Amino acid sequence: MEEWCRTLPKIELHAHLNGSIRDEIVERIAKRKCVDLNELAGYRIPDAKTRSLADAFDIFSVIYKLTTDADTVYEITTEVLKDFAEDNVIYLELRTTPRSRPTLSKRCYVETVLRAIGDARVRHPTLDVRLLLSVDRGADTAADALDTVALATEFAAPAGPVVGVDLAGNPYKGQFETYLPAFQAARQAGLRVTLHAAEILVPAETEQILAFRPDRLGHCCCLDERCEAMLQELGIPLELCLTSNVKCQSVSCASDHHFKGHYDRRHPVILCTDDKGVFSTSLSQEYALAAETFNLTRRNLFDLASQAAEHVFADESTKSLLREHFRRAAETLAFD
């Protein structure tokens, strides 16, 4: 099934840049920067291994030690886009948190990622890439969040490659209400909003997030009955990441994943990778895992992939192109 899934055109809507770097690239950069390779041992969570969600966020401190200059940011972005293109991803919304470094401002960081995305259009003409700028709830202040939204607004207009903003980071830190003014400003500026939500059981915050009615939600692993009912009533599309949630112990195993309940209720769901480098996966593997775990057919997987086009943050003309791509693909894919 995985081989067939690689032939399937796919849309990726929840992928963090710094968590999507494959091992050899991390090691290559570390050697060049004379970083002790022993420090990189925790970057990837191998197959059959898990970590607590809190511990998983420590992994990113490793990559932050490497992405301290524009050349490295360009390199990792280029390599990540190459991987997605080779996995037959035709539309990608990559997300990343702009961070100021001694030799790299937030603006320069964003400009460098966008330069790599622009250059990738030539190298990978079948891959359409857009960017989401993330607010890190574990590190950003309210003022930082407003700065990020301002950058996103600037690079989104007119018809720019930035299409939205995201709330990410360690769910044990920070509070959504701190960043609410920034996301309200983003909405007023015409940006789309996706929020990580309910990665841990925090019903009061989850209710606040649902009341805001973001355009999409990430994860939503831990919902009480009230929040579950709110989510179903609102019909907000869900970005679901099977391997990530299992390896971070947000769910006990793939068969217990909440994907199945939402899928059976026809709630809009999009399969995603989250951090393909950290979790040793690919979008094709996520589709194959869903098929194996939930007894989905090839036609079911095709429908999942094609329906994701309805939830991208790009404009209607892009959605039309994606729909046409899937229509043509349906004529050549083997469904038996």
Image (cartoon, grey):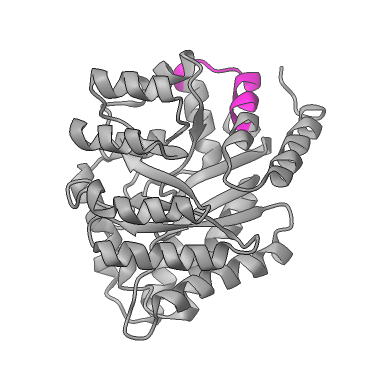
Q: Is residue 164 magenta?
A: no
Q: Position of residue 324 (x, y in %)?
A: 78, 36
Position of residue 143 in the picture relative to residue 273 (left or right): left
Does residue 31 lie above or below 140 as drawn? below
Residue lying farthest front?
Answer: 188
Q: Is residue 280 visible?
A: yes
Q: Residue at x 73, y 35 (%)?
A: 323
The C terminus lies in quadrant: top right
- Front residue (pair 24, 110): 110
Position of residue 199 in the picture relative to residue 311 (left or right): left
Q: Position of residue 138 (x, y in %)?
A: 22, 57
- Front residue (pair 181, 310): 181
Write the start and end of the magenta stretch as one range: 293-305
- Front residue (pair 11, 160): 160
Q: Quadrant of residue 12?
A: top right
Number of numbered callouts drawn: 0
Does residue 21 lie above or below 264 as drawn? below
Does residue 10 lie above or below 170 as drawn? above
